[in-house]
Amino acid sequence: MELGLTLGYWNRAMPADLVDWFKAADQLGYDAVWTAESWGSDAFSPLVLAAAHTEHIKLGTGVVQLSARTPAATAMHAVTLDHISNGRVILGLGVSGPQVVEGWYGMPSRRPLARTREYVEILRRAFEREGPLEFQGEHYQLPYTGEGSEGLGKPLKIMTHPLRQIPIWIGAEGPKNVAQTTEIADGWLPLYYSPWRPEVYHEQIKDRKLGFGIGVNVTFKIHDDVEAALLPTKGMLAFYIGGMGAKGQNYHTKLMARMGFEEQAYKIQELFMDGRRDEAVMEVPTEFADEISIVGSVERIKDRLQAWEESAVTMINVAPRSVDELRVIAELVKG
């Protein structure tokens, strides 16, 4: 089992101890560090800082949003960072939901699977650098020849030579999206995954290629009171399931429902949208929060880690509260 550090995205400002986290994770043998983006800090820039202060750890975007950049712009970011880090980049991609795609990026949110497939194909061709980049798809055209075109576009080949075919991981939730991810990507970043419910994704991932990575963000906390340890996870779940999307079009709500908690999922969404957020948090089942987390006493954690080791997951990503906790987790997971 590989171990990753997830630092998410910034809130009000850059965390003061960011470099300390990068250095500590690298020294403790963490396999990857992941950064994210929503509508604040971007995912690439902090990894440049990480590259400057580390030697071994992989640098993952978990995830950069497709609507934030054209495929060619993302290729440029990834190739540049891969050079800076001497070939340590994992390019994590995701489509996000309509509220963010259309509300923040001002882009259409339709047909996410088709957009993802075209985006990845363009990235692959850019990284291969076998010739000038040409692509005529439904969502992306290189050169662009559509409405408003001057008709002067020229196929180009990326000037900076890629070091390699940079691995692409995709954040996917829906069954069709997950199945497509195993086909076109090198890894998958699930939002929620329970090793006790492998049937939820079995059909989608059973034919994954050799070496296909699955990296899951988990709450990892040593605590004698499991219920208290899970309270922050319940708060996060209530926010995502209740508020990160519109009624009838929230991927997170639908995922919880598919995982066997349909009644509770839609109750959480209803409470959250009615402004009853504390009640929404209390509606999150402890069983659900516990299955997608690793919490409890050291003995309980060791026992539950066995289920993760035996699952399809190849990497668990954690977000400790201190460097000391970062060290303890490494000892428990890496032995």
Image (cartoon, grey):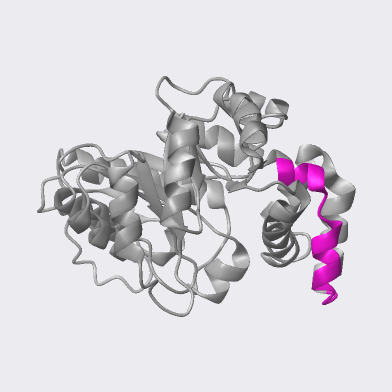
Residue 59 makes an appearance in the image: no
- Does residue 197 appear to the left or right of 122 in the view shown? right
- Does residue 66 appear to the left or right of 88 in the view shown? right
Q: Position of residue 330 (x, y in %)?
A: 43, 39
- Does residue 273 appear to the left or right of 192 in the view shown? right
Q: Position of residue 45 (x, y in %)?
A: 29, 65
Q: Is residue 228 above or below residue 105?
A: above
Residue at image point 31% right, 55% down: 22
**Any magenta on residue 320?**
no
Residue at image point 72% right, 43% down: 290
**Any magenta on residue 284?**
yes
Question: In terms of depth relative to the viewer, which is nearer, 215 or 181?
Answer: 215
What's drawn in magenta, residue-wise?
274-290
Residue 333 makes an appearance in the image: yes
Question: In terms of depth relative to the viewer, which is nearer, 246 or 295?
Answer: 295
Residue at image point 28% right, 44% down: 27
Give the dominant element type of the magenta stretch: helix, strand or loop.
Answer: helix
Residue at image point 64% right, 44% down: 192
Q: If the image is split into quadrants, where does the C terminus sit?
A: top left
Q: Position of residue 166 (x, y in %)?
A: 27, 40
Q: Is residue 204 above or below residue 161?
A: above
Q: Position of residue 152 (x, y in %)?
A: 18, 66
- Does residue 184 appear to the left or right of 100 in the view shown? left
Furthest residue to the bottom?
12
How many numbered discs? 0
